[in-house]
């Protein structure tokens, strides 16, 4: 098991300062399109009450024309700290969208400059802004002028291995008024493949005065600690490691604060969480929520007896009742099998040692 050095504990003991906004946790839940809706965030926050969460990315052009708040931008008045993430390439649309985000309750506004998806980059948004650093700076200045909350940026290290420009880019973001930078240590060309190059995050940390958050391959408490040590970053952001595992941010946060590992949830506890997730998605979004829940349910169904079969069944559920019943049956099977094991152990304990 990893240990928390006193140097790291000391370095991270103060609140994270994003401009004049303070966060009492150095672990953040990343924005994940199709995942980090209000329901998912509620589950993550149960285990990490003081951590910063992000909405899914919201299209500023869409907001400009529709003028109506999409469901992915909805924030619960009780959920704080919360950042609303926007994407686009138009400084004026982003400024307008940022004002709507603040009106909805955003503590900070984050601008996505890292999304690798073609649909986004071909319209000039996401990671394509790495290739337009002047426009990216103009965007940050425009949004900073439009709102009275800190503006932050999330990006990658470059477009390709041959075009790693994060050091210059990061400095431009800071000069334009960004109050925090999250760096995903991959290039756009890497997508989500290969390992995240944390060494570039360490270099970014050396050239900036604003907080730098490290992102990429934080799948465990051990990885989070290693990343913080290697990069000198001010915090870590968990992403794919939270899929089907809303406990991760809380586990890392607890370890960084206490130096002790939280007991990890048992398969039954993970399934109970899946059950609640499904129920809450249904209550929040109706049958559309159930369809969205399918992928979540498959992510939860891992690492226990019968998980593969359950995964197959949950990936095609048609209604909430069907999903709940499948999960209840799986929980009952796991409880029954653990009781059998306990009975066997108890029986074995009664047999005199010499008789075995
Ligand atoms: C399903 C999925 C959706 C994502 N959606 C967003 C998003 O809306 N905004 C964003 O900035 N990054 C998004 N990302 C990128 C992650 O936030 C993160 O930067 C990336 O997964 C790297 O971290 P990891 O290696 O720990 O997963 C998404 C990633 C995945 C897998």
Image (spheres, rainbow, N blue to C red):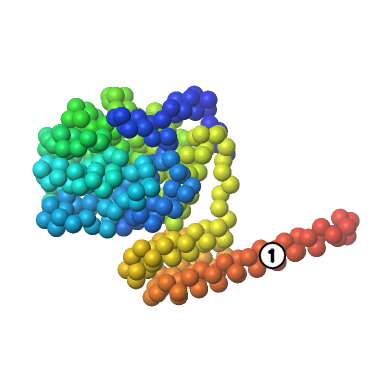
Residue 132 makes an appearance in the image: no
Quadrant (top left/top right/bottom left/bottom right) for the N terminus:
top right
Residue 44 percent across, percent down from the top left: 43, 50
Question: Could you tell me residue 42's position as x and y percent?
Answer: 41, 52
151 left or right of 38 in image? left
Question: Residue 143, how many percent across, how many down?
Answer: 17, 38
Which residue is labeled 1 in the image? 339
* Picture residue at 17% right of the left edge, 30% below the top: 176
Residue drawn at x 42%, y 34% is 24
- Whether the residue under disc 1 has CB within 8 Å of ligand 1: no
Is residue 290 positioned above or below 257 on the image? below
Position of the C terminus, as image quadrant, is: bottom right
Is residue 272 in view?
yes
Q: How many marks?
A: 1
5 left or right, relative to 167: right
The residue drawn where x is 33% and y is 65% is: 285
* Residue 103 vs residue 44, the one in the foreground: 103
Comparing 77 with 317, the one in front is 77
Describe the element under mark 1 as helix, strand or loop. helix
Tell me: 16 left or right of 333. left
Q: Name the residue nearer the viewer: 261 or 160.
A: 261
Q: Residues within 10 Å of mark 1 (few under 14, many from 20)?
A: few
Q: Quadrant of residue 154?
A: top left
Viewer-proximal residue, 318 or 158? Answer: 318
Identify the residue at horizontal 52%, vertical 37% (top origin).
255
Classify 97 as above or below 17: below
Query: x, y percentage for residue 187?
Result: 26, 42
In this rendering, position of residue 54 left or right of residue 58:
right
């Amino acid at each position: 098991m990893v240990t928390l050095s006193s140097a790291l504990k000391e370095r991270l003991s103060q609140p994270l300062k994003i401009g004049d906004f303070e966060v009492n946790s150095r672990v953040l839940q990343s924005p994940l399109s199709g995942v980090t809706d209000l329901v998912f965030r509620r589950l993550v926050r149960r285990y990490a009450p003081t951590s910063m969460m992000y909405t899914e990315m919201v299209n500023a052009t869409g907001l400009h024309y529709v003028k109506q708040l999409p469901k992915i931008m909805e924030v619960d008045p009780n959920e704080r700290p919360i950042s609303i993430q926007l994407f686009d390439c138009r400084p004026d649309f982003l400024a307008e969208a940022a004002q709507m985000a603040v009106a909805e309750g955003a503590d900070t506004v984050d601008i996505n400059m890292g999304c690798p998806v073609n649909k986004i980059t071909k319209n000039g948004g996401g990671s394509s802004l790495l290739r337009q650093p002047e426009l990216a700076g103009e965007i940050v200045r425009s949004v900073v002028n439009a709102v009275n909350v800190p503006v932050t940026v999330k990006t990658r290290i470059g477009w390709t291995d041959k075009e790693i420009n994060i050091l210059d880019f990061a400095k431009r973001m800071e000069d334009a008024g960004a109050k925090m930078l999250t760096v995903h240590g991959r290039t756009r060309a890497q997508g989500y493949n290969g390992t995240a190059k944390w060494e570039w995050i360490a270099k970014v940390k050396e050239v900036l005065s604003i907080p730098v958050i490290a992102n990429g391959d934080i799948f465990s408490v051990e990885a989070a600690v290693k990343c913080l040590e290697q990069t000198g970053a001010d915090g870590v952001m968990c992403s794919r490691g939270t899929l089907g595992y809303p406990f991760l941010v809380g586990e890392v946060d607890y370890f960084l604060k206490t130096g002790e590992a939280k007991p990890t949830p048992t398969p039954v506890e993970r399934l109970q969480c899946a059950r609640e997730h499904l129920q809450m998605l249904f209550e929040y979004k109706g049958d559309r929520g159930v369809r969205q829940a399918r992928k979540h349910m498959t992510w939860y169904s891992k690492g226990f007896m019968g998980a593969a079969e359950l995964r197959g069944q949950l990936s095609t559920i048609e209604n909430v009742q069907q999903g709940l019943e499948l999960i209840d049956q799986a929980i009952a099977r796991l409880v029954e099998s653990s009781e059998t094991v306990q009975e066997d152990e108890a029986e074995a304990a009664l047999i005199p040692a010499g008789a075995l």
